[in-house]
Amino acid sequence: MTSTASPARPTLSTADWLLLVALSILWGGSFFFAKIAVGELPPLTVALGRVGIAAAALVLLARLMGTALPAGAAWRPFAVMGLINNVVPFGLIFWGQTHIPSGLAAILNATTPLFTVLVAHVATADEKLDAARLTGVAAGLLGVTVMIGPDLLREIGANVWGQLACLLAALSYAFAGVYGRRFRGEPVLRVAAGRLSASTILLLPLVTLIDRPWMLPFPATTAIGALAALALLSTALAYVIFFRILGSAGATGISLVTFLIPVSAILLGTQILGEQLAARHIVGMAAIALGLAAVDGRPLRWAYRVGTGFSPR
Protein backbone atom coordinates (compact mmCIF):
# COMPACT_ATOMS: atom_id res chain seq x y z
CA MET A 1 0.00 0.00 0.00
CA THR A 2 1.45 3.35 -1.08
CA SER A 3 1.76 6.01 1.60
CA THR A 4 0.17 9.38 0.87
CA ALA A 5 1.83 11.18 3.77
CA SER A 6 3.54 14.44 2.94
CA PRO A 7 7.34 14.55 3.22
CA ALA A 8 8.62 15.76 6.59
CA ARG A 9 9.20 19.48 6.69
CA PRO A 10 12.74 20.53 7.64
CA THR A 11 12.99 22.23 11.04
CA LEU A 12 15.70 24.12 12.87
CA SER A 13 17.68 22.28 15.53
CA THR A 14 19.28 24.07 18.48
CA ALA A 15 22.61 24.04 16.64
CA ASP A 16 20.92 25.53 13.58
CA TRP A 17 19.49 28.38 15.67
CA LEU A 18 22.92 29.17 17.12
CA LEU A 19 24.47 29.16 13.66
CA LEU A 20 21.61 31.32 12.39
CA VAL A 21 22.38 33.95 15.03
CA ALA A 22 26.10 33.86 14.14
CA LEU A 23 25.22 34.23 10.46
CA SER A 24 22.95 37.19 11.20
CA ILE A 25 25.84 38.98 12.93
CA LEU A 26 28.17 38.38 10.00
CA TRP A 27 25.60 39.42 7.41
CA GLY A 28 24.36 42.29 9.59
CA GLY A 29 27.76 43.89 9.14
CA SER A 30 27.66 43.42 5.36
CA PHE A 31 25.36 46.41 4.81
CA PHE A 32 27.70 48.60 6.86
CA PHE A 33 30.84 47.40 5.09
CA ALA A 34 29.20 47.67 1.66
CA LYS A 35 28.02 51.22 2.32
CA ILE A 36 31.61 52.28 3.02
CA ALA A 37 32.99 50.42 0.01
CA VAL A 38 30.48 51.74 -2.57
CA GLY A 39 31.33 55.25 -1.44
CA GLU A 40 34.60 54.93 -3.36
CA LEU A 41 34.19 51.93 -5.69
CA PRO A 42 31.55 51.02 -8.32
CA PRO A 43 28.97 48.42 -7.23
CA LEU A 44 30.12 45.65 -9.60
CA THR A 45 33.74 46.16 -8.53
CA VAL A 46 32.71 45.83 -4.89
CA ALA A 47 30.80 42.65 -5.78
CA LEU A 48 33.84 41.24 -7.59
CA GLY A 49 36.13 42.13 -4.70
CA ARG A 50 33.75 40.51 -2.25
CA VAL A 51 33.45 37.18 -4.06
CA GLY A 52 37.01 37.15 -5.43
CA ILE A 53 38.77 37.61 -2.10
CA ALA A 54 36.39 35.20 -0.38
CA ALA A 55 36.85 32.62 -3.14
CA ALA A 56 40.65 32.81 -2.86
CA ALA A 57 40.45 32.29 0.91
CA LEU A 58 38.10 29.31 0.66
CA VAL A 59 39.95 27.65 -2.23
CA LEU A 60 43.17 27.87 -0.20
CA LEU A 61 41.39 26.42 2.83
CA ALA A 62 39.92 23.63 0.67
CA ARG A 63 43.40 22.75 -0.62
CA LEU A 64 44.81 22.66 2.90
CA MET A 65 41.98 20.41 4.10
CA GLY A 66 42.10 18.14 1.05
CA THR A 67 38.60 19.04 -0.15
CA ALA A 68 38.20 18.51 -3.90
CA LEU A 69 36.67 21.33 -5.95
CA PRO A 70 34.18 20.75 -8.79
CA ALA A 71 35.51 19.62 -12.17
CA GLY A 72 34.12 19.64 -15.70
CA ALA A 73 30.32 19.60 -16.01
CA ALA A 74 30.03 19.63 -12.21
CA TRP A 75 30.67 23.39 -12.36
CA ARG A 76 27.30 24.08 -14.00
CA PRO A 77 25.11 24.04 -10.87
CA PHE A 78 27.76 26.06 -9.05
CA ALA A 79 27.62 28.67 -11.81
CA VAL A 80 23.82 28.85 -11.55
CA MET A 81 24.02 29.19 -7.77
CA GLY A 82 26.72 31.83 -8.06
CA LEU A 83 24.60 33.79 -10.52
CA ILE A 84 21.38 33.87 -8.47
CA ASN A 85 22.92 34.07 -4.99
CA ASN A 86 25.95 36.32 -5.63
CA VAL A 87 26.24 38.04 -8.99
CA VAL A 88 22.63 39.23 -9.35
CA PRO A 89 21.76 40.13 -5.72
CA PHE A 90 25.15 41.64 -4.85
CA GLY A 91 25.12 43.81 -7.93
CA LEU A 92 21.53 44.93 -7.28
CA ILE A 93 21.98 45.62 -3.56
CA PHE A 94 25.28 47.47 -3.96
CA TRP A 95 23.81 49.59 -6.76
CA GLY A 96 20.70 50.18 -4.66
CA GLN A 97 22.83 51.35 -1.73
CA THR A 98 24.23 54.14 -3.88
CA HIS A 99 20.67 55.55 -3.99
CA ILE A 100 19.05 54.56 -0.68
CA PRO A 101 20.20 54.27 2.97
CA SER A 102 21.61 50.93 4.13
CA GLY A 103 18.84 50.65 6.74
CA LEU A 104 16.16 50.85 4.07
CA ALA A 105 18.07 48.26 2.03
CA ALA A 106 17.99 45.98 5.08
CA ILE A 107 14.21 46.39 5.38
CA LEU A 108 13.76 45.47 1.73
CA ASN A 109 16.16 42.55 2.09
CA ALA A 110 13.93 41.23 4.88
CA THR A 111 11.28 40.42 2.27
CA THR A 112 13.40 37.39 1.28
CA PRO A 113 11.38 34.96 3.47
CA LEU A 114 8.16 36.18 1.86
CA PHE A 115 9.51 35.33 -1.58
CA THR A 116 11.14 32.12 -0.32
CA VAL A 117 7.92 30.73 1.13
CA LEU A 118 6.18 31.31 -2.21
CA VAL A 119 9.02 29.91 -4.34
CA ALA A 120 9.46 26.90 -2.04
CA HIS A 121 5.71 26.22 -2.15
CA VAL A 122 5.82 25.94 -5.94
CA ALA A 123 9.20 24.26 -6.35
CA THR A 124 9.47 21.79 -3.44
CA ALA A 125 7.48 18.91 -1.99
CA ASP A 126 8.32 19.42 1.68
CA GLU A 127 8.12 23.20 2.20
CA LYS A 128 4.52 23.92 1.32
CA LEU A 129 2.79 27.15 2.26
CA ASP A 130 0.43 27.06 5.22
CA ALA A 131 -1.34 29.65 7.35
CA ALA A 132 1.22 29.47 10.16
CA ARG A 133 4.16 30.11 7.84
CA LEU A 134 2.43 32.98 6.07
CA THR A 135 1.42 34.55 9.39
CA GLY A 136 4.92 34.08 10.79
CA VAL A 137 6.62 35.70 7.83
CA ALA A 138 4.21 38.66 7.98
CA ALA A 139 4.86 39.10 11.71
CA GLY A 140 8.62 38.96 11.21
CA LEU A 141 8.53 41.53 8.42
CA LEU A 142 6.40 43.79 10.61
CA GLY A 143 8.95 43.43 13.41
CA VAL A 144 11.83 44.42 11.13
CA THR A 145 9.87 47.47 9.97
CA VAL A 146 9.06 48.54 13.53
CA MET A 147 12.68 48.14 14.65
CA ILE A 148 14.16 50.25 11.87
CA GLY A 149 11.69 52.97 12.82
CA PRO A 150 9.41 55.43 11.06
CA ASP A 151 12.08 57.82 9.83
CA LEU A 152 13.37 55.54 7.09
CA LEU A 153 9.86 54.46 6.15
CA ARG A 154 9.14 58.04 5.10
CA GLU A 155 11.74 57.57 2.39
CA ILE A 156 9.76 54.83 0.63
CA GLY A 157 8.69 56.31 -2.68
CA ALA A 158 11.95 58.19 -3.22
CA ASN A 159 14.67 56.57 -5.26
CA VAL A 160 12.22 53.97 -6.49
CA TRP A 161 14.74 52.21 -8.72
CA GLY A 162 17.10 51.62 -5.80
CA GLN A 163 14.27 50.08 -3.80
CA LEU A 164 13.16 47.90 -6.70
CA ALA A 165 16.75 46.71 -7.12
CA CYS A 166 16.85 45.53 -3.49
CA LEU A 167 13.47 43.79 -3.85
CA LEU A 168 14.67 41.98 -6.98
CA ALA A 169 17.77 40.94 -5.03
CA ALA A 170 15.52 39.46 -2.33
CA LEU A 171 13.63 37.50 -5.00
CA SER A 172 16.93 36.21 -6.39
CA TYR A 173 17.97 35.08 -2.90
CA ALA A 174 14.67 33.19 -2.61
CA PHE A 175 15.36 31.23 -5.79
CA ALA A 176 18.91 30.58 -4.57
CA GLY A 177 17.66 29.23 -1.25
CA VAL A 178 15.49 26.68 -3.05
CA TYR A 179 18.02 25.84 -5.77
CA GLY A 180 20.75 25.35 -3.17
CA ARG A 181 18.94 22.32 -1.75
CA ARG A 182 20.58 20.21 -4.46
CA PHE A 183 23.94 20.66 -2.71
CA ARG A 184 22.79 18.74 0.37
CA GLY A 185 25.26 16.04 1.29
CA GLU A 186 28.20 17.73 -0.42
CA PRO A 187 31.11 19.07 1.67
CA VAL A 188 30.26 22.57 2.87
CA LEU A 189 33.70 23.93 1.95
CA ARG A 190 33.44 22.54 -1.60
CA VAL A 191 30.04 24.16 -2.12
CA ALA A 192 31.06 27.57 -0.74
CA ALA A 193 34.41 27.70 -2.56
CA GLY A 194 32.93 26.42 -5.81
CA ARG A 195 30.06 28.88 -5.85
CA LEU A 196 32.23 31.88 -5.02
CA SER A 197 34.81 30.85 -7.63
CA ALA A 198 32.07 30.58 -10.25
CA SER A 199 30.73 34.00 -9.20
CA THR A 200 34.18 35.51 -9.61
CA ILE A 201 34.49 34.11 -13.15
CA LEU A 202 31.03 35.46 -14.06
CA LEU A 203 31.72 38.94 -12.65
CA LEU A 204 35.22 39.44 -14.03
CA PRO A 205 34.25 40.23 -17.65
CA LEU A 206 31.39 42.50 -16.50
CA VAL A 207 33.70 44.56 -14.29
CA THR A 208 36.33 44.72 -17.03
CA LEU A 209 33.83 46.00 -19.60
CA ILE A 210 31.70 48.28 -17.40
CA ASP A 211 33.70 49.56 -14.42
CA ARG A 212 37.31 49.41 -15.69
CA PRO A 213 38.58 49.77 -12.09
CA TRP A 214 42.23 50.22 -13.15
CA MET A 215 41.24 53.69 -14.37
CA LEU A 216 39.72 54.73 -11.02
CA PRO A 217 41.55 56.57 -8.19
CA PHE A 218 43.09 54.27 -5.62
CA PRO A 219 40.55 53.82 -2.78
CA ALA A 220 41.16 54.96 0.79
CA THR A 221 42.32 52.57 3.49
CA THR A 222 38.85 52.53 5.05
CA ALA A 223 37.28 51.34 1.81
CA ILE A 224 39.91 48.62 1.38
CA GLY A 225 39.40 47.48 4.97
CA ALA A 226 35.63 47.44 4.52
CA LEU A 227 35.95 45.38 1.34
CA ALA A 228 38.28 42.90 3.08
CA ALA A 229 35.85 42.51 6.00
CA LEU A 230 32.96 42.16 3.56
CA ALA A 231 34.81 39.35 1.75
CA LEU A 232 36.41 37.42 4.60
CA LEU A 233 33.83 37.78 7.36
CA SER A 234 30.50 38.55 5.70
CA THR A 235 31.14 36.19 2.77
CA ALA A 236 33.79 33.47 3.21
CA LEU A 237 32.97 32.58 6.80
CA ALA A 238 29.28 33.41 6.43
CA TYR A 239 28.70 31.11 3.46
CA VAL A 240 30.28 28.12 5.16
CA ILE A 241 27.68 28.63 7.90
CA PHE A 242 24.95 29.31 5.30
CA PHE A 243 25.35 25.96 3.56
CA ARG A 244 25.55 24.13 6.89
CA ILE A 245 22.12 25.52 7.87
CA LEU A 246 20.63 25.08 4.39
CA GLY A 247 21.55 21.41 4.36
CA SER A 248 19.65 20.65 7.57
CA ALA A 249 16.91 23.28 7.83
CA GLY A 250 15.85 23.91 4.23
CA ALA A 251 15.26 27.05 2.18
CA THR A 252 12.65 28.61 4.45
CA GLY A 253 14.75 27.96 7.54
CA ILE A 254 17.83 29.69 6.15
CA SER A 255 15.73 32.65 4.93
CA LEU A 256 14.85 33.48 8.56
CA VAL A 257 18.31 35.03 8.95
CA THR A 258 16.98 38.16 7.22
CA PHE A 259 14.78 38.78 10.28
CA LEU A 260 17.68 38.42 12.69
CA ILE A 261 20.10 40.73 10.87
CA PRO A 262 18.53 43.97 12.19
CA VAL A 263 18.30 42.43 15.69
CA SER A 264 22.02 41.65 15.60
CA ALA A 265 22.82 45.17 14.42
CA ILE A 266 20.90 46.74 17.32
CA LEU A 267 22.41 44.46 19.96
CA LEU A 268 25.93 45.13 18.66
CA GLY A 269 25.21 48.87 18.68
CA THR A 270 23.98 48.90 22.28
CA GLN A 271 26.70 46.63 23.67
CA ILE A 272 29.72 47.95 21.74
CA LEU A 273 28.83 51.50 20.65
CA GLY A 274 26.78 52.47 23.70
CA GLU A 275 23.63 53.21 21.70
CA GLN A 276 20.29 53.32 23.51
CA LEU A 277 17.70 50.61 22.95
CA ALA A 278 14.41 52.32 22.05
CA ALA A 279 10.96 50.96 22.88
CA ARG A 280 10.30 50.20 19.21
CA HIS A 281 13.31 47.89 19.20
CA ILE A 282 11.78 45.80 21.99
CA VAL A 283 8.44 45.67 20.16
CA GLY A 284 10.16 44.80 16.88
CA MET A 285 12.23 42.00 18.39
CA ALA A 286 9.11 40.57 20.08
CA ALA A 287 7.28 40.51 16.73
CA ILE A 288 10.28 38.83 15.10
CA ALA A 289 10.39 36.19 17.84
CA LEU A 290 6.69 35.42 17.30
CA GLY A 291 7.24 35.25 13.55
CA LEU A 292 10.15 32.84 13.89
CA ALA A 293 8.12 30.67 16.25
CA ALA A 294 5.22 30.53 13.80
CA VAL A 295 7.42 29.64 10.83
CA ASP A 296 9.39 26.96 12.70
CA GLY A 297 6.31 25.60 14.45
CA ARG A 298 7.94 23.77 17.35
CA PRO A 299 7.76 26.55 20.00
CA LEU A 300 4.03 26.96 19.36
CA ARG A 301 3.47 23.18 19.55
CA TRP A 302 5.39 23.09 22.82
CA ALA A 303 3.29 25.95 24.25
CA TYR A 304 0.10 24.18 23.18
CA ARG A 305 1.22 20.90 24.78
CA VAL A 306 2.14 22.64 28.05
CA GLY A 307 -1.15 24.54 28.15
CA THR A 308 -3.50 21.68 27.21
CA GLY A 309 -1.61 18.48 27.88
CA PHE A 310 -2.20 17.36 24.28
CA SER A 311 0.04 17.44 21.21
CA PRO A 312 -1.48 19.19 18.14
CA ARG A 313 -1.77 16.96 15.10
Image (spheres, rainbow, N blue to C red):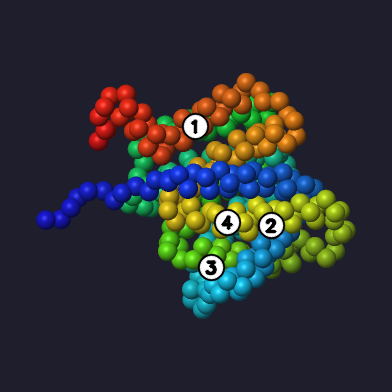
Q: Quadrant where the N terminus lies?
A: bottom left
The percent position of residue 33, horizontal first and vertical second, equals: 73, 48
Residue drawn at point x = 36 percent, y = 28 percent: 303
What is the secondary structure assignment of the residue under circle 1? helix
Up/down of 181 relative to 10, above or below: below
The disc labelled 2 sits on which kind of residue?
A: Ala
Look at the image and tell me whether residue 158 can be seen: no
Q: What residue would you read off at disc 3?
A: 190
Up/down of 176 relative to 13, above or below: below
Toward which corner of the image does residue 134 lie, by quadrant?
top left
Q: What residue would you read off at disc 4?
A: 239
What is the secondary structure assignment of the residue under circle 3? helix
The percent position of residue 302, horizontal first and vertical second, equals: 35, 32
The disc labelled 3 sits on which kind of residue?
A: Arg
Decide if residue 136 is on the left or right side of residue 215: left
> In the rendered structure, which disc, 3 or 2, sits on the residue that comes first in sequence?
3
Q: What residue would you read off at disc 1?
A: 289
> In the rendered structure, which disc, 2 or 4, sits on the residue that comes first in sequence?
2
Q: What residue would you read off at disc 2?
A: 231
What is the secondary structure assignment of the residue under circle 2? helix
Decide if residue 107 is on the left or right side of residue 46: left
Q: CA distance from mark 3 to mark 2?
A: 17 Å
The disc labelled 4 sits on which kind of residue?
A: Tyr
The percent position of residue 220, horizontal first and vertical second, equals: 86, 53
The disc labelled 1 sits on which kind of residue?
A: Ala
Label 1 crowd bin: few (<14), some (14–19), many (20+), radius 10 Å? some
The percent position of residue 290, horizontal first and vertical second, equals: 46, 30
